[in-house]
Image: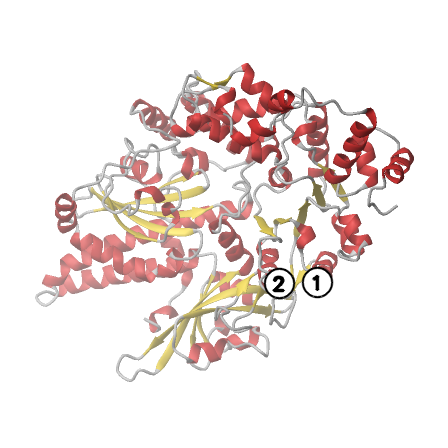
Amino acid sequence: MTAMFTSSFDSSLSSCQSMPFSHRKIMTKKRWETIANYKDNFLNNLTVDPRQCSQIDSEVAASWLRSKQAEVNAFAPCLDQKLTEQEFESIREKNQQLIEVSLSLFKVFRQLANAPGYALYLFEKNGVFLLLEGDILKIPFAEYGSLVGRICDESTLGTCAHVLSMKLKRPVQLQGPEQYCVALHNLVASAAPIFDENEEIAATTVLCQTMVTPPWDKNFQNMCSHTLCLITAIAAAIEAQLKLSKSNNHLQNTNKCLISANQELRLAYETLEATFACIDDIITVIDKEGRILRTNREGLRTFGLRLEEVGRRQITDFLDKHSCLMDTVLKRQASNIEETIYAGKFEQSYVIDIHPISNKSTGELETAVLRLSPSEKVNAAAAKRTGATARFTFGDIIGESPVMAQTIKQAQRFANSPENVLLVGESGTGKELFAQAIHNNYRPLGPFMAINCAAMPRELIESELFGYEGGSFTGAEKTGRPGKIELASGGTLFLDEIGDMPFELQSVLLRVLEDKQVMRVGGRRYKSIDFRIIAATNKDLWQMVQEGLFREDLFFRLSVLSISIPPLRDREGDIELLADDFAERYCFKLGNQPLKLDSGAKDALMKYTWPGNVRQLQNVIIYAVNNAQGDNIQFRDLPKLVNRLNPINQEKSNAAKVLSLEDTEKNAIESALKKTDNNVYEAALLLNIGKSTLYRKIKKYQFDVDI
């Protein structure tokens, strides 16, 4: 196989590019938004005809209409149509040769299929899921378990690439909202049909990829063009191998069959060559001495090599002198490491997948195939796989009170700035909701990495934030792991409960904020990163600075833009609004008719002080919905905690007890100081009196407060 790499890429790529790709309109931002808006209106049963929109391909529009007529649920597609074990065994026997050939070729491309953000699938001509390499579809459809054996056609999944490809008998690529199912809106699917010897559709193969950059980005569109070329090449290779397999019985009898088989074999080889040319990662073959035997176009471009230099240059010419690449290759074990590639002024970090190839007879290493993927690309895909996304926007924040409306407007203004943001508020006020909204306003396509400094064990915070190199400490992964800061590059790092960050790590975080560079634990070099910090706390950080518990310079660096989120008790009118919304959402989740709160329940909620804020209110409503016995939520359905502490019940028990004016004043001051952790300034604001007046009364009633 190594010797076959000496053929020219140019002729291979030309043969691939001459295949009948589907005509594609350029995906601009305007076109994307137009399609998405039409899709929303169409799915919400508004009177719109997608065929009238010039931005939507006519075949896609027609498929939308068929999908809707078939009553496909775009928000929760029904994939329950699964063949019985006996039915699937029959299908598998009929397609045994197709599956074997496809599986062998999928293994060739396994490193592509298993790379984060990519997956390969094979569908039988009637839409039966036959084979998969990769797990992109497992995330949105995890509830179905294995997808193999399920029927994925237009009546179950709606508009999708493999259905249109088989219907139109040509390669098809669908991006984001062009696909009917909402769960597929973050994917690009490229499909190509596989024909049998009678030129009838036998199956279709699909290459899925996640979007880690804006879909209208020029580089992303180039990548989409490459993946369409790639999946067509794979389909052609499967066809060629199928035909070759059918010809094998005649190879020993006639020269004619031998010539035909050789042509088929060369076609399969050229298809493989064209495939490697289309991959946007670097694919390089080296020998045991490190000499570069072959590399694809991306490798030639990155290394700055001419074709005649291939075979003469060493891979170590482009690595750091401390590189462990060759030591790892000589161990003859598949693995991956992270290295920096140096080519002239070019310098970039890559994750390198190493696949050694040994002589079957002697067991000695002959060559190794290297796949080099930019670390940023791998990290972005890893961030998405770990759920590092922000779901909420400013439109999801509920609140019409003047103080909340003012807070939202301030956050929207700050969201447009690249500066760090500090969110201050009591527990349960919705600080992470604001953090996600700010992120989605400023960098919606970037990762949103969240870490709770209070919940993380002290000894793990450093490795979680900064990552570590392989073997840095006992229990560390051999290949190392990027930290949350590194994964947040291009997006936002949300540090919740920042006041609980260990003091000794605060100086390290400060240096990262100043230099925009991070070094992993046990690392030897810094990596440049681009991220924004949003920090949140329910503590008085300035008071902690005064007490020497928090670094003053870090405080000023984090609080460039500070937002104070009001507690629920100060949001007049929002309690009823939030309660109704929580009740409606939770009833919908249970599949029940929505319950309304009667006047008694609303009055109790309005008079309660809500120490746990919005989070506590949500839990109270969940309890009340489950406890309600009628068509509405009554006072008796509320938790005992709210009933017992509610002023409605306290009025009866306190009716006979009348406090003096002095006792009332003393109790009010004591309560205000307790709520503000003895912060005289904030307590004076709560009591609506002057600071000097409060100092005088503190002295009068002999409260234990530092003055």
Q: Which mark is residue 18?
A: none
Residue 415 visible in the snapshot: yes
Q: Residue at x 29, y 50 (%)?
A: 235
Q: What is the secondary structure assignment of the residue under circle 1?
A: helix
Q: Return the residue at label 2.
A: 462
Q: Nearer the viewer, residue 324 or 264?
A: 324
Q: Earlier in the sequence, mark 2 or mark 1?
A: 2
**Is 167 above or below relative to 92?**
above
Within 10 Å of disc 1 (Cα), the crowding (few <14, some 14-19, many 20+) is some
Using a 10 Å C-alpha cutoff, classify the residue at mark 2 as few (fewer than 14 neighbours), some (14 to 19) or many (20 or more).
many
Q: Amino acid at mark 1?
A: Val
Quarter of the figure with the N terminus = bottom left
Q: Residue furthest left?
A: 253
- The residue depicted at 26 percent of the width and 36 percent of the height is 80
Q: Residue 46 in the image: state x and y as whole percent.
A: 44, 17
The residue shown at (62%, 34%) is: 613
Q: Tell me which amino acid carries mark 2.
A: Glu
Identify the secondary structure beneath mark 2.
helix
Mark 2 and mark 1 residues within 8 Å of each other at the beta carbon: yes
Q: Nearer the viewer, residue 433 or 201?
A: 433
Q: Name the image colouring.
A: secondary structure
**Image quadrant in which you'd find residue 165:** top left
Q: Can residue 33 be seen by looking at this rendering?
A: no
Q: Position of residue 606 (x, y in %)?
A: 62, 22
In the rendered view, tell whether residue 144 sits above or below residue 501.
above
